[in-house]
Amino acid sequence: MCLAVRIYDLPMAEAIVAGVMIKDGRILLCHRSADRQWYPGVWDLPGGHVEFGETPTEALKRELVEELGVCVHSLSHPLDRLCTPEFEMDIWQVTGWDGTPANLVPEEHDAIAWFTAEELTSLEIAHDSYLPLLRTVLKRQP
């Protein structure tokens, strides 16, 4: 459920999707390039915009192929929804993928890296709500 109130004389918020990828007790984050219009120079979850005619899960799978070169074959139920006046972002845990993540879009991200829960606290992260969500997801890992 989205708790933000939409102001109807503004354009509709954009639909965004993001994926939480965990490997060996670490979460993959992408560092947004300094020249990005939105959230420059911070660590963010991989993902992007839902295009016309796509479902959110189709968009997430496409974005992860384009950005990281991985083929997603399984996702959790949505973990969270982040709402702002500009966008609504649904976040899934990517529970299965083929391939090794690589930074395929250096114009969007200048780095990608895996982080433990402890390392997350020292990062400048795109959204304050990420930290408790990511810690919770990491705690649930076997």
Image: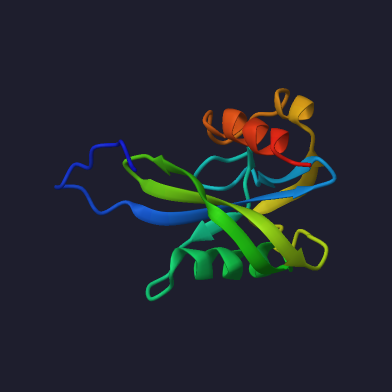
> Residue 14 location, x and y as percent?
36, 55
Residue 64 relative to residue 115: left or right: left
> Residue 133 location, x and y as percent?
58, 34
Vertical side of 19 occupied by 128: above or below: above
Residue 37 relative to residue 124: left or right: left
> Residue 92 location, x and y as percent?
56, 52
Residue lying farthest to the front in this orientation: 142
Q: Quadrant of the N terminus?
A: top left
Q: Quadrant of residue 141?
A: top right
Q: Residue at x 68, y 57 (%)?
A: 95
> Residue 115 location, x and y as percent?
78, 37
Residue lying farthest to the bottom in this orientation: 53
Vertical side of 135 occupied by 107: above or below: below
Q: Quadrant of residue 74?
A: bottom right
Query: How many numbered marks appear?
Result: 0
What is the image's colouring?
rainbow
Front one among 34 and 83 = 83
Q: Residue at x 65, y 69 (%)?
A: 66
Q: Residue at x 29, y 36 (%)?
A: 4
Residue 48 relative to residue 71: left or right: left
Q: Quadrant of the C terminus?
A: top right
Residue 69 relative to residue 75: left or right: right
Vertical side of 88 occupied by 107: above or below: below
